[in-house]
Image: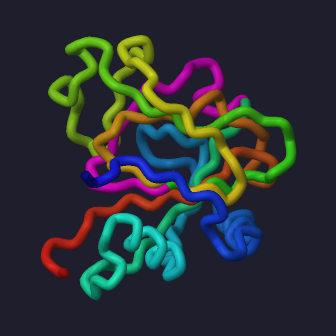
Amino acid sequence: MRKSIEVVDGFYRDPVDRRELALGSEWVAPDGASVFDEWTRDAFPDIEATARISALVGRDSDATFPTLAGRFTFVGNGGVRYWQRAAPHVHDEQWAALVYLAPPEGGFSSGVEFHRPASAASTPGAWGSSGVHEVQHPDLWEETLYVPLTFNRMVLFQGSIAHRCAGRGFGRTPADGRVAQLFLFDEPVGGR
């Protein structure tokens, strides 16, 4: 049976370098509806992440697996979602990988929650088709798993699994806030 969620601590060999790359990047407000307050203008190709993630999805020796590029994301305390809790959402891509690069100190409480529908109104047929699908009523969902934020923890999951940021984020800027690197991807057809 293939796993649908995988958690790996100590994901990057040098996570401080990744964090410095994130903090030195240009941050912008996302276009349209987003669960993030800011993200980096550019996505960054990452050979190390590609090697680790492709192995986890069973494609480690597959030459057709593309080099993954991930954007850095920021969810702050007092940001766009401060007064409302984000509803669970899904992605069009087969897989999502989230690597936490928030500072290891601070006493914050955050992470990612995974959910299942609590009613027919929160099934995929009720969603749109814009890439990130969100139902606006968080109480239509039941939490099934919580993965706390830990520095350099990677959470890999199938994009069709409803999930949301646990808590409201923290910090006022990427330098003191909930920063992560997000990879969204489909497995290549063929190979192996």
Q: Residue at 71% across / 54% down in the picture?
A: 151
Name which quarter of the figure residue 162 lies in: top left
Residue 25 located left or right of residue 89: right
Does 168 sit left or right of 44 as displayed? right
Residue 51: image location, x then y, percent? 45, 78
Q: In the image, what residue occupies the spot 66% across and 64% down? A: 10
Tell me residue 46's x, y (percent). 51, 77
Q: How is the image coloured?
A: rainbow
Q: How many marks?
A: 0
Q: Residue furthest bottom?
A: 63
Residue 62: x, y in percent? 28, 83
Instruction: Report the magenta residues as a range.
Output: 78-97
In the rendered image, the quadrant that contains the C terminus is bottom left
- Find out whether residue 149 is within the magenta segment: no
In this orientation, does residue 69 appear?
A: yes
Q: Is residue 168 left or right of residue 5?
A: right
- Residue at image coords 67%, 59%: 152
Q: Is residue 94 magenta?
A: yes
Please tell me which residue lies in front, 39 or 191.
191
Front-most of residues 121 and 7: 7
Tell me which corner region of the image, top left, top right, bottom left or bottom right, holds residue 168.
Answer: top right
Task: Tell me if residue 24 can be seen.
Answer: no
Residue 80 x, y percent position in the rendering = 60, 32
Rendered view: 14 above or below 22: below
Q: Is residue 140 above or below residue 92?
A: above
Which image quarter: residue 59? bottom left
